[in-house]
Image (spheres, rainbow, N blue to C red):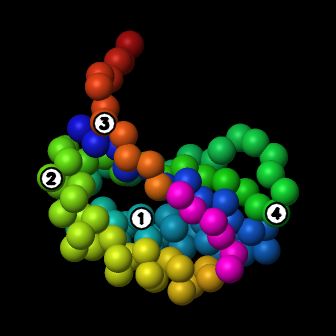
Amino acid sequence: MILYNVTVNIDHDVHDNWLRWMQEVHIPEVMQTGMFLEARISKILAEEEGGKSYAIQYLAKDMETYETYRDRFAPELQKAHTEKFAGKFVAFRTLLRVENSFYP
């Protein structure tokens, strides 16, 4: 399994609009690509000047599936985010391979 993590710091003045848009539009559009098994958005519990930070995580079954998403879908989806919130966020992406999962 591949965990695609996008960490975003969003300015306070657009936070509420951004969070609503992420949950109602962007994340559902990413999931509609069929490339991910699940998604979650988590608030990073740290005080930061200039904004609030979130981790948005998507789980893909394998690297090939992630690469298909990256090549076919990500550019357009990222462009929409950048155009809507230009100058109001910083983001970085991390790719992780899930080695094991543990449940109670």
Residue named by callout 1: 27
Residue drawn at point x = 33 percent, y = 71 percent: 74
| Front of the two marks 1 and 4 | 4
Q: Amino acid at mark 1?
A: Ile
Q: Is residue 80 magenta?
A: no
Give the Cα distance between marks 1 and 2: 20 Å
Q: Is residue 23 above or below residue 97?
A: below
Label 4 with label 2: CB-CB less than 8 Å: no
Q: Nearer the viewer, residue 25 or 54?
A: 54
Residue named by callout 4: 50
Residue drawn at point x = 15 percent, y = 52 percent: 64
Q: What is the x, y in percent for residue 47?
A: 81, 46
Callout 3: helix, strand or loop?
Answer: strand
Name, please, the residue furthest toward the top.
104
Give the Cα distance between marks 3 and 4: 31 Å
For residue 51, which quarter of the picture? bottom right
The part of the chain drawn in magenta is 87-92
Query: Dot 1, how many residues are within 10 Å of its Cα: few (below 14), some (14-19), or many (20+)?
Result: some
Callout 4: helix, strand or loop?
Answer: loop
